[in-house]
Image (spheres, helix red, strand yellow):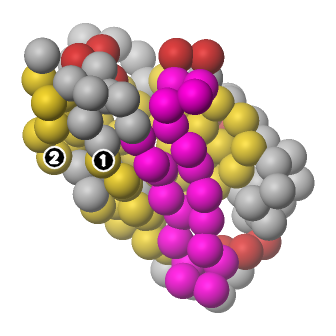
Amino acid sequence: QVQLVESGGGLVQAGGSLRLSCAASGRTFSNYGMGWFRQAPGKEREFVAAINWSGGSTSYTDSVKGRFAISRDNAKNTVYLQMNSLKPDDTAVYYCARRKFSGGTSSFHRDYDYWGQGTQVTVSS
């Protein structure tokens, strides 16, 4: 069974930064792509960023390009989301997820099979 545990959320002022971490259990972390999604109150869960197994391929939703960066450390079984220039619209619960495959990236929920419990990010104006 794979467990994903997010951390690093919190309250930050607009323009500030946060770094989210997602620690994964299991010995096959490096075999899979990973992704970050978010869900704001009253809205559907949306794709934020994804990374392939090696870290050599990444993708982002348009609204975070140039502000957010996804990375991973396979030796630590951890994926990160560095969030800079935060805006109030970034307020949401952020979830990490394990993709079913290793190659490429995906923005589709159906391509992910394990999810963390989420970490709250609140950006004040």
Q: Quadrant of residue 5?
A: bottom left
What is the spatial separation of the Cα atoms under label 1 and label 2, in whole angstroms? 8 Å
What predominant SS class does the magenta segment belong to? strand
Quadrant that contains the C terminus: top left
Disc 2 packing (10 Å; few <14; some 14–19; many ≥20): some
Question: Residue 72 at what x, y percent from top left?
Answer: 61, 65
Q: Is residue 92 left or right of residue 113?
A: left
State whether residue 31 is above or below residue 45: below
The secondary structure type at the circle numbered 2 is: strand
Q: Amino acid at mark 1?
A: Leu
What is the secondary structure assignment of the residue under circle 1?
strand
Q: Which of label 1 and label 2 is nearer to you?
A: 1
Q: Amino acid at mark 2?
A: Gly
Q: Position of residue 92 (x, y in %)?
A: 27, 29
Q: Position of residue 35 (x, y in %)?
A: 59, 46
Task: Determine the residue positioned at 29% across, 61% down.
Answer: 7
Q: Which residue is mark 2?
A: 10
Residue range of the region highlighted in magenta in the rendering: 64-83
- The residue at the point 23 percent across, 18 percent down is 88
Marker disc for residue 18: 1
